[in-house]
Amino acid sequence: YLSIFGPLYYSFALGSTLFIVLNNSNEEDIDPWQMRWFKEELEKSKNYNHSFVFMHVPVYDPRKSMADQPGHSLKDLDSAKKILELMKSYKLDMVFAGHIHGYFKGDWEGVPYTVTGGAGAEMIYSDPAHYFYHYIKVTVAGDKIKYDIVRMTSPDFNFIDRIEAFLWIYF
């Protein structure tokens, strides 16, 4: 991964927008070095008009109340609380996460988030408001940000194909 894509967490700026990409793929937390780096990046975000944070695993599962965690989210609740408290201290335009194969939008105590996991594995739930193939086109123009959810054709869930895929991966 490192030789092809580069660091496991990083940031970059494009115009007046800062993008911060975290690595929480262990589903537990982010390590102390990354947490220190994240604080420094959030401080830098004060110099930008817009800032977005990206992570694989959402801080909290939007399908459950924050009090009933962990769901399909960070398993270390103390770490989840620390990350959320840190993000609450800064103006973030959006926190994007994946991990949950669906679409959810809301806020964690004032921190706006979008879970956008609709481009990977099959959608196994039936609620069409949340479980559909999609991607999100984000347009930043001056002070305005526009989020367009682009729905894609969602094939029916095929249990046999899913079992074959699991067998192929694990054997």
Image: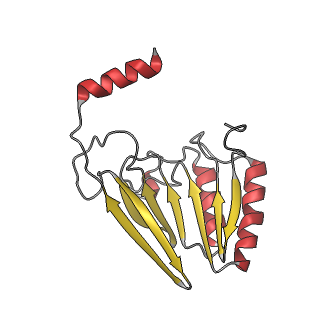
Horizontal side of 34 relative to 87 (left or right) equals right
- Residue extending farthest top: 171
Horizontal side of 7 relative to 68 (left or right) equals right
Write the residue at 54% across / 49% down.
Answer: 56
* Vertical side of 146 occupied by 32: above or below: above
Nearest the eye: 142 or 43: 142
Where does the image place residue 5, in percent across and percent down from the top left?
A: 67, 43
How is colour applied across the structure in the image? secondary structure
Write the residue at 28% across / 40% down.
Answer: 124
* Vertical side of 48 occupied by 120: above or below: above
Where does the image place residue 44, in percent across and percent down from the top left?
A: 75, 71
Nearest the eye: 45 or 58: 45
Horizontal side of 36 relative to 52 (left or right) equals right
For the C terminus, the image quarter is: top left
Where does the image place residue 115, in percent across and percent down from the top left?
A: 44, 57
Write the residue at 23% across / 52% down.
Answer: 127
Write the residue at 73% across / 79% down.
Answer: 47
Where does the image place residue 149, in percent across and percent down from the top left?
A: 36, 64
Nearest the eye: 78 or 117: 117
Which quadrant of the view contains residue 90?
Answer: bottom right
* Vertical side of 151 occupied by 8: above or below: above
Q: Is residue 109 among what the camera can see?
A: no
Q: Is residue 32 among what the camera can see?
A: yes
Nearest the eye: 166 or 60: 166
Which quadrant of the view contains residue 26?
Answer: top right
For the N terminus, the image quarter is: top right
